[in-house]
Amino acid sequence: MMIELKNVTKVYGTRKAVDNISFSVDKGEIVGFLGPNGAGKTTTMKMITGYMPPTSGTIKIAGYDIVEQPIEAKKHIGYLPEVPPLYLDMTVEAYLHFVGGIKGVPPKKRREDVERIIHEVGLTDVRKRLIKNLSKGYKQRVGLAQAIIGDPDVLVLDEPTVGLDPKQIKEIRDIIKELGKKHTIILSTHILPEVSMVCDRVIIINKGKIVAIDKTENLSTALQNSRRYFIKVEGPYEEVVNSVKEIEGVTNVEAEVDSDNTIKLTVESSADKDVRKDMFFAFAKKGFPILELKMLNYSLEEVFLELTTEEESYDENVGNTKEGA
Ligand SMILES: Nc1ncnc2c1ncn2[C@@H]1O[C@H](COP(=O)(O)OP(=O)(O)OP(=O)(O)O)[C@@H](O)[C@H]1O
């Protein structure tokens, strides 16, 4: 386990920016932290990297507690913040040596690292240039380069492609995928397609809470393939459950006996079939009164509506973008 969060909460004044989240990231994974603006992504990244302590809960990096053992833990982390800490009047090369020094990388290893990294993130042509004269895409490469100096196991990347043009975005994503072969990566984004392009797994956060964690390939299935309902019925448990299971289109039924001896059910059906009427008639036929019936919206679905999908209108062959909503 390279990253492990347990019941992490961050409160700013009276506002809960992050609300009791727990997750872990295994060695070698690229995990996307996806959520709309203000969801708590940056706050979480700052806590993972030790820039800010959680109000409660624990965070471990490579087994070290970021609050209790910050020096050990931080040795394992490379961080690309929202705004990378670049020294604009330095050359790329000088800056990377400087960062290596700050991170305590010994001089010989530092020289080797800088050479290798300049090559890895494609900075060879601009290595002698002043950072202030670089394009945004190249500045972001320098940001990535400073994060990987010292060979940290874990890379934490906060919105690594934000503000870049489509060509630069693709280049940075390719670099990240390549880095993922050697490092465990968690990156935040508010762009849905970015996750499917880059990440193995996704953690979706909204209003400070995790609303889903899943393999990237399962995301769309989870969203598109089912409807859910809550229903409360009076009647004998077995018969109630069986009546629902027999309905065509019902794919899953979870039931429990409530304190007042009624049965509470969460029912799933395929997306193309609304089974509310069928449930009504099935129970009416048996004489089991329905006390409550409602459709459950996936909170996931609501979150997705807020996420930027502007890239879908981008045509790579033509190379132009439309400003998305
Ligand atoms: N220093 C702070 N003091 C008070 N509130 C803050 C502070 N930093 C963030 N917040 C609030 O906490 C919530 C989560 O913010 P955070 O920056 O973590 O979200 P985010 O998902 O990274 O969004 P964005 O993509 O816009 O950066 C927001 O409502 C924000 O206004």
Image (cartoon, rainbow, N blue to C red):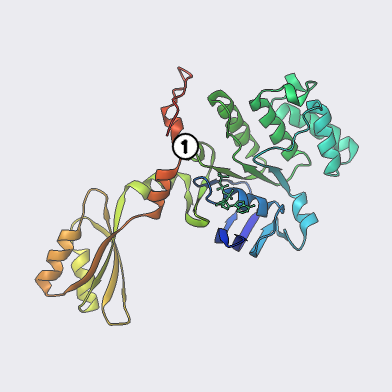
Residue at the farthest left position: 285
Q: Residue at x 56, y 60 (%)?
A: 16
Query: Based on the displayed image, in which of its 4 quarters is residue 64 positioned?
Result: bottom right
Q: Position of residue 145 (x, y in %)?
A: 72, 34
Q: Residue at x 27, y 82 (%)?
A: 261
The answer to whether residue 121 is visible is: no
Q: Is residue 156 positioned above or below 316 on the image?
A: below
Query: Based on the displayed image, in which of its 4 quarters is residue 310 positioned?
Result: top left
Q: Tell me: 127 left or right of 178.
A: right
- Tag 1 residue: 193
Figure label count: 1
Q: Tell me: 121 left or right of 246.
A: right
| Quadrant assignment for the C terminus | top left
Q: Amino acid at mark 1?
A: Pro
Q: Is residue 200 positioned above or below 173 on the image?
A: below
Q: Secondary structure at mark 1?
A: helix
Q: Position of residue 206 (x, y in %)?
A: 48, 52
Q: Is residue 144 positioned above or below 255 on the image?
A: above
The answer to whether residue 221 is visible is: yes
Q: Tell me: 39 left or right of 93.
A: left
Q: Position of residue 58 (x, y in %)?
A: 66, 63
Query: Based on the displayed image, in which of its 4 quarters is residue 18 positioned?
Result: bottom right
Q: Is residue 309 positioned above or below 31 on the image?
A: above
- Label 1 neighbourhood size at 10 Å, few (<14), some (14-19), many (20+)? some
Residue at the farthest front position: 13
Residue at the farthest right position: 107
Q: Tell me: 305 left or right of 9.
A: left
